[in-house]
Amino acid sequence: MSEYKIYSLHMGKAKCAVDLGDGSERGEYVNQDYILNKMGRPLRSISLMYCYYPLDKEFPGRISEVMKDADVSFAWDYPYDDYFTYKGGLEGNTEGEPFTCMRDVRRHGQDVTLTLTVDPHVSDEQLIAIANDLRPFGRLLLRINHEATGNWFSFNKRCTYQEVADFYCRFNKIIKEHAPNVSTILCIGGVEDPNKNEIEKEAEFSQAVKETDIWSVDKYMALHWGWPYDVAERGGTSHSRSKVKDIYDMTKRSFERFKEINGGVTKPMVMSEFNADGDVTGPYDQAAMVKEFCDMLKADGEDWFSGFTFYQFRDRGRLGLEIQDPNYADCGIEQPVMKTYKEIIHDDFFKPSMTRGDEVTLPCTLRWGGSEDAEGLEIPLHFEKNPHFCEVTFDDDSNIMMEINGKWFYKSPEAKTIDLMAAFYEKPLEGEADLTLRLFAPPASGENDLSVEDGLMNSYTEIKKLPDIRIRFEPVEL
């Protein structure tokens, strides 16, 4: 019998969820172990960006590599969008990207937001194949043809806005039928003119507003869209900067108009890309603007905003928490906004809720629905003072996410001992303290078992015993 009391624990939604972009046309995917160690906690969701243009002769090659000698002067001047290419679907399989990244994200206790730009001319059979690809990945968020009221992506150059909107509804219907575990995100311009109440291309996209699961706008408080083909300088025409309050107010007005279009019924409202471009603001104002926006969210007494995605973790330009080292692509150079974003995501307003339940005994089964609905364990621990050693040792191949003193740790199926002392470096205990060790069990493979009755939505793990918990309050030898 364990010497520790064990309680059931439910992890639920935050007042405002925080997500993170990881990889795009401007940066490569960074593994989740690195990101977890840097951020100190998992995010609600990790946003991955891919494209699907299987009718093009260059596909599935990444277009900037296939056409590396092309004379282009804008990021979106290629025949199709310069994202990494979706390797699944009717023509492919789920062994490559984005599925390797999706598994990495989910085993680390996070949901996946898959941004997918798609040629609207693909067949229903090709869309059904994508839906079937996504079935094992739990409560996935699918952002289809984002920024759809713009004019830069290839799908907008190939079709009218009405055709793009109709395609969204077609793909959304297929997702609902074949992958009901997936929630769809409609990302359009919203209200962009201070003197108008209508959203951009309202006539074309009103039906999509009604049919989607989630509403979204992308908002950059500052952006250098000419990157990397020119340098932003004062008086230039390839960048802009807005007031934080104006961005906040426009986003809120967008939500209100979406609600009106939907007959007064609300849906979750998110910002799928959010940042201030350091190319325009410099590193210090970038951090200050991100903080100002989040302070406005906390001060707003109305419950209208569900979450936002910081774009992105590592960037070759100045839109990242890290800038990619030009000498070594796998190395990031931390920016001041990293410290700011860490402070934001560790604020209670942006952290998932934790609700302790009844005392339990082992063995027991833990349920992982997703980062906003999971059942774990909570173990109260008493500390005499700040420890010199704090570690847990497992004797099984479980896949575990753990939190103590506000810091999260990952145990892969191969790992045995996890050193928890990093939880006390930035937040040392000043005396006696009662803390809790929290454990959750996301799927070890990153995929749900679809043979289970509710496997589309949940994953289950049996916990037979606790790890050995070793806490010492002085060095081994004095």
Image: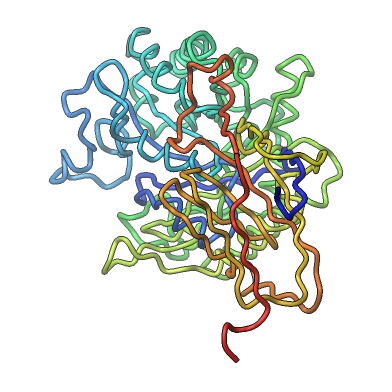
Residue found farthest to the left = 69
Find residue 184 and report its horizontal and vertical position in percent.
Answer: 55, 23
Residue beneath the point at 68% across and 36% down: 375
- On screen, residue 161 above or below 233: above
Q: Is residue 262 left or right of residue 24?
A: right
Find residue 114 and report its horizontal and vertical position in percent.
Answer: 46, 33
Residue found farthest to the right = 301
Residue situated in front as seen by the camera: 42 or 261: 42
Residue situated in front as seen by the camera: 186 or 423: 423
Quarter of the rendering occupied by the C terminus: bottom right
Q: Is residue 275 left or right of residue 344?
A: left
Residue beneath the point at 43% across and 17% down: 131
Find residue 463 and report its horizontal and vertical position in percent.
Answer: 60, 39
Q: Quadrant of residue 202?
A: top right
Find residue 16 and report its horizontal and vertical position in percent.
Answer: 72, 44
Q: Is residue 74 left or right of residue 168?
A: left
Residue situated in front as seen by the camera: 39 or 24: 39
- On screen, residue 218 above or below 129: below
Q: Is residue 276 left or right of residue 261?
A: left
